[in-house]
Amino acid sequence: MNRKPIFAANWKMNKGVSETEDFIKSFLSKIQGQDFPAEIVIAPPFVSLPKLADLLHNANAVQNAHAIQIAAQNASQFDAGAYTGEVSVVMLRELYVHYVILGHSERRSIYGETDAVINAKIKKAREVNLKPIFCIGETLEEREGGKLETVLRTQITEGLKDVSEKDMLETVIAYEPVWAIGTGVTATSEQAQETHAFVRSVLADLYGADIAARIRIQYGGSVKPGNAAELMACPDIDGALIGGASLEPQSFMEIIRNGCAE
Ligand code: 13P
């Protein structure tokens, strides 16, 4: 099955407007002339989205740079109204945003997002054709307690409740073991492949094997230039969601390059 790998930078709460500009100028010069067989996505904080859209639009027009897609890190499950601090999916579309990260473990653990809330956000995103990057993952305690499969099956089943096959084909899954996020500890490629295969089997239960074989599943958690090739060589790993190592243009470029080397 030919699934185009997708490498997404999740900058979390890093890089305002001027740092975004510095990053993009440097990153574009590094990827210029390289034709990676992959999709490249950058998810800056909300406030940097307009600047990113401008910079990429100009770059694409002027230098025919590798097209980079823009992602948001979150979106509201509501349309509009009295929701202080929230940003709607329609607002994101106006800023040329194509992807939205939903259900990140930091949203779950720090902001109390439940599977039901994440499910509502996924469906709201699809109403305006935003592509969800739907994050799932277990804690170390859950893995060591033998609950890995139950936890992931619940997150997937509840998060995707009433999400149609058509919408599922526009959704990317990001498997991010919580214990590997920002810790420097990566899942071994065996652990990651085994878990990705399990995630795909749950998707097959829900949507059938044909659809499951077409859904991209990214790995996230301490992905670096040095481990990208080995992880991406696994048959069920279709790209990466990268935090810390995506903040430097050189290391983000190297992750993509090494990850595409397979
Ligand atoms: P790190 O790459 O910093 O471990 O973060 C992973 C992550 O949470 C991406 O969403």
Image (tube, rainbow, N blue to C red):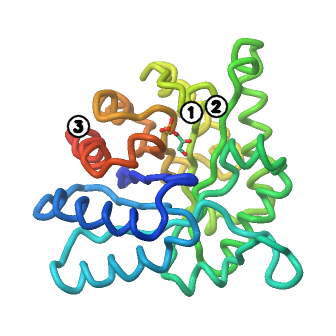
Confirm or reject: label 1 Cβ below 8 Å from ligand 1.
Answer: yes
Quadrant the C terminus occupies: top left
Residue at image position (67%, 72%) is 125
Q: Going 74% across and 36% down the picture, which residue do you hit?
A: 153
Circle number at residue 178 = 2
Q: Secondary structure at mark 1?
A: loop
Are discs 3 and 2 less than 8 Å apart at CB?
A: no
Name which quarter of the figure residue 147 lies in: top right
> For mark 3, what is the residue?
262
Front residue (pair 59, 139) = 59
Q: Residue at x 79, y 81 (%)?
A: 79
| Above or below for 112 versus 189 | below
Left or right, 202 with respect to 59, comes to right
The residue shown at (56%, 33%) is 181
Q: Which residue is mark 1?
A: 181
| Foreground residue among 141 and 130 | 141
Say whether marks 1 and 3 touch (CB < 8 Å): no
N-term-proximal mark, 1 vs 3: 1
Q: Is residue 225 left or right of residue 194?
A: left
> In the rendering, at what x and y percent does residue 203 appear?
64, 45
Q: Amino acid at mark 1?
A: Ile
Q: Are marks 1 and 2 in contact (CB under 8 Å)?
A: yes
Mark 2: few/some/many CA within 10 Å (<14, 14-19, 20+)? many
90 in relation to 222, above or below: below
